[in-house]
Image (cartoon, rainbow, N blue to C red):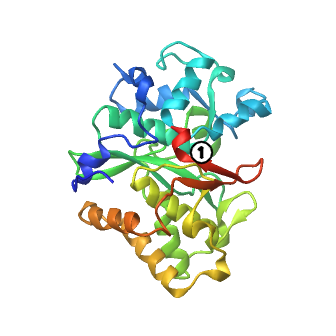
Amino acid sequence: METTTNPLEYYANPGPMTNALAEASSFDDLPTELPALCRILQGTLIHIFWAERQGVKLSDERKLEVQIRSVSRKLARIHELDDRPITVERAPESRLVGNCRDYSIILCSILRYQGIPSRARCGFGTYFTPNHFEDHWVCEYWRSDEERWVMVDAQLDALQRQVLQIQFDPCDVPFGQFLPAGKAWQLCRAGQADPDKFGIFDMHGMWFIRGNLLRDLASLNKMELLPWDCWGLIEKEEQALVEEDMVLLDRVAELTLADNKHFDEMCSTYESDVRLRVPEVIRSYPTTGAQTVKLATEL
């Protein structure tokens, strides 16, 4: 953990996954306006679930690009596909295949490169399927003139906004449209929402919300992992959870939703508990089957 106790200073600097490293020059001379940055990402990435609507039939090999964890490796792959600056819009078939997490962490990386406090958030979107909370990631940045965290969904391009009939500004997503995993956890624990409406495909329920809760906590500590990466309490069977685990998870939910004043406690809670902290080796569950991953090799 970095030594600073200032959350805005902490989130203005990259972490292991968002450090562009040798690819950092890709971010030189980019615009600072959020809509313009989102358009750059939309012209550089293609969402794995929206590719066919854009006329692209992805090969199994291309689909594996969603397994790339770090921004530096993503940028390297982007330039393998097309070596022009990222400000140049690519043809859909020449864009990096990604998902919501990729749009979010690359935007987060750009903003941190520009010195703007930002962080990727893991939770659930309400705007993909009626009466359902879809597994989703967004990016938050600190708007200093209003002293608040603003949510940005960089994935929502013109096609998606039209198909999904998006009525809000993707560069200022209202809290109720996207729920951080901690809020989903609280609602379901209180019996105010049905946990089976939270998830993706045939995966849903409290176990799924718990996974996103820990991924959101890790992301708030600058370890933005893949949606199918698992460790600690994520992997514990539902029936094996004890009261101590539930008390801890309830506190984690509170801390991930708390304001900047609780930053120190949020970080110390994460760092001090092996049930929460991302270890050097994790288990990942992509569609190809379970894998053991040493994170140092992913950077």
Question: Within 10 Å of the Cα at label 1, are there few (<14), some (14-19), or many (20+) other Cα atoms?
Answer: few
**Above/below status of 64 relative to 27:** below
**Along the line of sight, the residue nearer the viewer: 235 or 191:** 235
What element does badge 1 sit on? loop
**Above/below status of 156 relative to 183:** above
Please report the residue visible at 63 percent of the width from the left and 70 percent of the height from the top: 207
Quarter of the rendering containing residue 12: top left
Reading the image, the residue beneath label 1 is 165
Quarter of the rendering containing residue 164: top right
**Above/below status of 186 relative to 141:** below
Q: Which amino acid does label 1 sit on?
A: Gln
| Quadrant, the N terminus | bottom left
Query: Residue 298, position in %: x, y?
Result: 55, 39
**Along the line of sight, the residue nearer the viewer: 102 or 274:** 274
Please report the residue visible at 31 percent of the width from the left and 47 percent of the height from the top: 11
Please report the residue visible at 65 percent of the width from the left and 77 percent of the height from the top: 238
Please report the residue visible at 27 percent of the width from the left and 63 percent of the height from the top: 264
Query: Residue 77, position in %: x, y?
Result: 59, 25
Query: Residue 63, position in %: x, y?
Result: 72, 35
Along the horizontal axis of the image, is 125 left or right of 110?
A: right
Query: Residue 133, position in %: x, y?
Result: 60, 61
Along the horizontal axis of the image, is 260 left or right of 224?
A: left
Considering every residue shown, the one lying at the far top of the view is: 84
Considering every residue shown, the one lying at the far bottom of the view is: 243
Q: Can residue 131 be seen in this view?
A: no
Q: Is residue 96 visible?
A: yes
